[in-house]
Structure formats: structure tokens, C-alpha cells
Amino acid sequence: MIRPPGFHSATLDLDGDVRASVPGHLGQTASLKRGSSFQPGRDDAWRYQTPHRVAFVEKLTKLVLSQLPNFWKLWISYVNGSLFSEKMIQEVMHCLVKLLRGALLPLSDAEGGGRQCRGWEVKAELSGQGLAHAIQTLRLTYESLTALEIPNDLLQTIQDLILDLRVHCVVVTLQHTAEEVKRLAEKEDWVVDSEGLTSLPCQFERCVVHSLQSLRDVLECKPGEASVSV
């Protein structure tokens, strides 16, 4: 199988940093056609609080974006000679999505083979905040790949993953909110204000509003995305 220069030397350490022989990584993709806006992990302060599996998604997508542009350009250059085929790009996308699913949906994706490739010690599902951050990373990754003019059908697996993550994020967030609402009774102090109300109704409102606000970007449909139906 013919690979573009440097592609075979990129290595991925699930417990450490991503290393690639091609310098520049994400910096190289900034000058792609139409100018990609992919900049995952802009907030370094937030990165230290990022779950390992979400950080893995950032590193893996950054690695793919540093290598795939040259791979795609080689296919474009030699397509008339049939040196490369779309099946190769499909295989790269399939491998990428399989690894991402294994990191982000390991508990629910066991039947789909995610458990075999995840390599994670999973004690609990990711929080809604972590999933929302991963969704944003994948959306920017998809935007960068479409800037290469890769046909949409080759990127459909990424869109499918984004939709699954959006649905999962909504479910996890609403479940967490329901648990918080159940615990509100423990915070009731029965101190009545001038309007004859305790603090409980206000706490309930804040809890629900915060939950809905955290899902605003997740529920918003980006170009090419389907609406979320839970």
C-alpha cells in the first residue's frame, strides 16, 4: 500500500502525547484551501481540567489533520492513473471514527466493537461538559476536512458520530439535571422570604436554566447536520 511521505511514521500513544514526524501539525492545516478555523484546545487553562478521553480526541484529530491533506492531494494528483482510490480515504475515516467512538462512547458502543479498540479504563461516562467539548472539536475537524474538498460521502461517518454524540450529550445532561433536582429537597431550609417563598423554587429554576444553556450549542444544527431527536 502506497502512503504519502511521513504518514507511516506518525505514532499515537493513548496514554501520552501524539508524536508525528511531519512538523507543524495543526499549523500546516491553517493554510488549507478556504482557510480552516480548526483550533481545538484554544484555552490552555481549560485543558488541564479536560478528561483524558476528550484530550485524546483533540490529539487524534490534530494528528489526522496534519497527515491527511498530503494524502488527499496525492490522490487528486494521481487519480487519473488510479494509483489511489477513494477506498483508502474511507479506510482512514473508518479508523479515525472507530478510535473516536472507542474513546467517547466506550460503554454504549461495546456491541459495535468499540470496546476492543478503546484502550481506556472507563469507570464512568463522560460528563455533558466533556461531551460538548468533544463535539466542538469534531465539528471543527469536519470543517477542516471539507475545506480539502473531500466528498461529503467520505466524511459521513464523522457526521454520524457527531449526531450520536449530540444525542448522548443531551441524554447525559438531562439525566444529571434530574439527579440534581431530586437532591434539591435536601437543601430546603424552609426560610420564607417576603413573598412567602423559600429558596427552593429559585434553585430549581437555576438548575434547569443552566442545563438548557449548556445544551444550546449542542442542539444547534450546523451545516449538514441532522436535528437531535431523543
Image: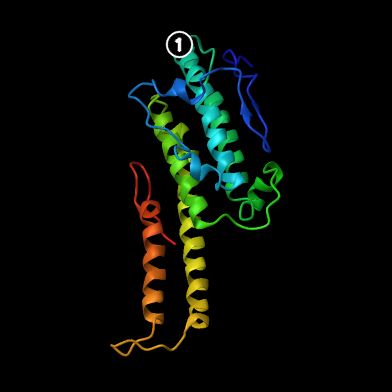
**At label 1, which amino acid type do we have?**
Ser
Q: Position of residue 117 (x, y in %)?
A: 68, 41
Name the residue located 33 percent from the left edge and 41 percent from the top edge: 223
Q: Nearer the viewer, residue 229 or 56?
A: 56
173 in relation to 164, above or below: below
Q: Position of residue 63 (x, y in %)?
A: 55, 28
Judge from the rendering whether residue 127 lies leftward or rightward of residue 39; answer left or right. Answer: right
Q: Could you say whether the residue bearing mark 1 is in a helix, strand or loop?
A: helix
Q: Residue furthest left?
A: 195
102 in relation to 108, above or below: above
Name the residue located 49 percent from the left edge and 39 percent from the top edge: 44
Q: Position of residue 210 (x, y in %)?
A: 39, 64
Name the residue located 36 percent from the left edge and 56 percent from the top edge: 216
Q: In the rendered image, which residue does mark 1 sit on? A: 77
Q: Nearer the viewer, residue 83 or 211?
A: 211
What scheme was used to colour the molecule? Answer: rainbow
Q: Nearer the viewer, residue 138 or 227?
A: 138
Q: How many marks?
A: 1
Work out which quarter of the rendered image holds the N terminus and state it.
top right
188 in relation to 212, above or below: below
105 in relation to 3, above or below: below
Q: Position of residue 124 (x, y in %)?
A: 64, 58
Q: Residues within 10 Å of mark 1 (few under 14, many from 20)?
A: few
Quarter residue 125 falls in: bottom right
Work out which quarter of the rendered image holds the C terminus and state it.
bottom left
